[in-house]
Amino acid sequence: MTRFQGILLFSVLGCVGVTGARGQLLGPKKPVVPVVIPTLQPPTPEYVFPAKQTLTFTVDWRVFTAGTAVFQIEQQGTTEKVTATGDSVGAVNMLFPVVDKFQAGFDTKTGCSTGFSKQLQEGRRKVNSDLTFDYQTGKQSLVEKNMVKGTSKSLSASIPACVADSLSAIFYVASQHLTIGQQVNFPLADAMRTVTVAMKVEAREEIKTPAGTFTTLRVQPTADEGVVKSRGQIWIWYTDDARHMPVQIRAKLFWGTITFHLQSVEAK
């Protein structure tokens, strides 16, 4: 089970690995359709961001508890900082130990990501990367270091005036109006491209977790290309209240389905 926690944060989302879009079959070239990137909408004025919050999830794969995932959220001025860790446990840890850490953030006034970094330790693989955004020059810059081989690479690409990242987007979406049958569209910086992610609010559901039973809104992120598309199908369940707190995440992948169940919520 390679890179188990790499699909964690879309993610979508929940999917944090850097991947490309799926290849296309060779054939007659189709007319090029101009890509229209949506404008990232600022958080709604009435939304209250948590000053400090820790969400702990158990991660189930088939009949096994395969790992834990912890999201720590902290407001620092006008920036909402998000830190996430993913660790494998039990038999999975013996077969393929995983200790992944991610950091991101976004401006609570504009919604714009302030950057995204990760430190991946998956089996013998150790990679650190930092993705930064310069909105004044319209550039994103990635520095990736292979800690085992001692090599590094730097990449840059254009971005629009404001983008989300694969981690903090989970909590940015919570700041938007979520209405069944409608969707939240925003630009996501993914693998040195900017892709459009649509978060469709599908239904209202009651979800039971170790942390309690919640009335939720089931939201599915989709994209035409990039990490959200190539990782499979993903859903996030947000509480159907003013908090829009994520309490369950599920990803259907080619090797099986994994589900994140909220274990606890702490104001720390």
Image (cartoon, helix red, strand yellow):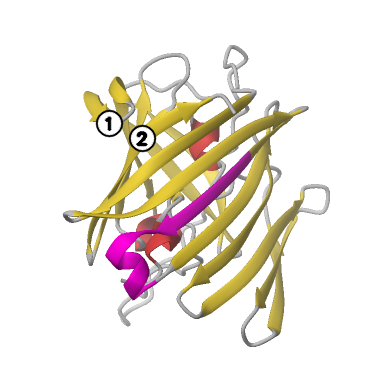
Is residue 199 visible in this depiction of the protein? yes
Above or below residue 27? Residue 112 is above
Q: Position of residue 113 (x, y in %)?
A: 66, 43
Asked whether disc 1 touches disc 2, contact meaning CB atoms under 8 Å apart, the reply is yes
Query: Is 25 colored magenta in this rendering?
Result: no
User: In the orientation shown, which residue stands out farthest toward the top?
Assistant: 46
Disc 1 to disc 2, C-alpha distance: 6 Å
Q: Position of residue 172 (x, y in %)?
A: 55, 33
117 left or right of 9?
right
Q: Which residues are the magenta region?
A: 82-96
Mark with earlier residue (1, 2): 1
Element under disc 1 = strand
Q: Which mark is residue 262?
A: 2
User: What kind of residue is marked 2?
Assistant: Leu
Q: Nearer the viewer, residue 25 or 258?
A: 258
Residue at the (49%, 32%) spot, across then down? 173
User: What kind of residue is marked 1?
Assistant: Thr
Residue occupied by mark 1: 209
Residue at the (46%, 50%) spot, across then down? 9
Query: Is 90 colored magenta in this rendering?
Result: yes
Residue at the (34%, 27%) spot, across then down? 211
Q: Position of residue 141 (x, y in %)?
A: 73, 63
161 left or right of 203?
right
User: In the orientation shown, which residue stands out farthest toward the bottom?
Assistant: 149
